[in-house]
Image (spheres, rainbow, N blue to C red):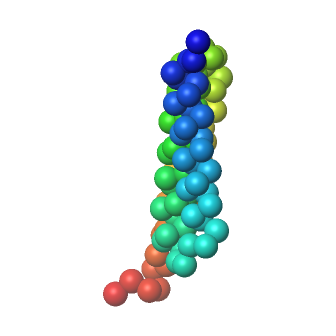
């Protein structure tokens, strides 16, 4: 029998991989940041679905850790230097 949570996790991981492919040709830094955020969000959603399918909570902990790291890196990268503000 097909596990619907495992199927959802695989689909979300495929979508995350497609978002990572968008990072490579991104013309600007902001396009790349959005693509990385979308990929990380989809990967975390896939990890949550995988947690439900497998029943192991370590996957949930790793997904939360990855989401926090991506959030901090995004904020750090997107900061505008103070010398360029009007």
Q: Is residue 29 above or below residue 84?
A: above
Location of residue 8 in the rendering, given as x and y in whole percent from the top left corner: 52, 30
Q: Is residue 48 or residue 16 the one in the foreground?
A: 16
The residue located at (50%, 45%) in the rendering is 41
Location of residue 15 in the rendering, given as x and y in whole percent from the top left corner: 54, 47
The residue located at (55%, 38%) in the rendering is 11
Location of residue 52 in the rendering, given as x and y in whole percent from the top left corner: 54, 19
Asked if residue 75 lies left or right of residue 85, the reply is right
The residue located at (58%, 24%) in the rendering is 6
Location of residue 20 in the rendering, given as x and y in whole percent from the top left corner: 61, 57
Q: Is residue 36 or residue 61 the one in the foreground?
A: 36
Q: Is residue 63 visible?
A: no
The residue located at (55%, 56%) in the rendering is 19
Q: Is residue 39 visible?
A: yes
Residue at the limit of the structure toward the front, as seen here: 1
- Quadrant of the frame with the N terminus: top right
Q: Is residue 63 above or below residue 75?
A: above
- Quadrant of the frame with the C terminus: bottom left
Label total for image: 0
Q: Where on the picture, by quarter, is residue 10? A: top right
Q: Is residue 5 or residue 33 the one in the foreground?
A: 5
């Amino acid at each position: 029998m097909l596990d619907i949570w495992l199927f959802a996790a695989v689909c979300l991981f495929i979508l995350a991989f497609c978002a990572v492919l968008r990072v490579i040709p991104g013309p600007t830094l902001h396009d790349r940041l959005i693509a990385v955020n979308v990929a990380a969000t989809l990967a975390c959603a896939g990890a949550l679905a995988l947690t439900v399918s497998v029943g192991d909570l370590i996957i949930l902990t790793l997904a939360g850790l990855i989401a926090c790291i991506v959030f901090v890196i995004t904020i750090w990268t997107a900061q505008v230097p103070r010398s360029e503000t009007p």
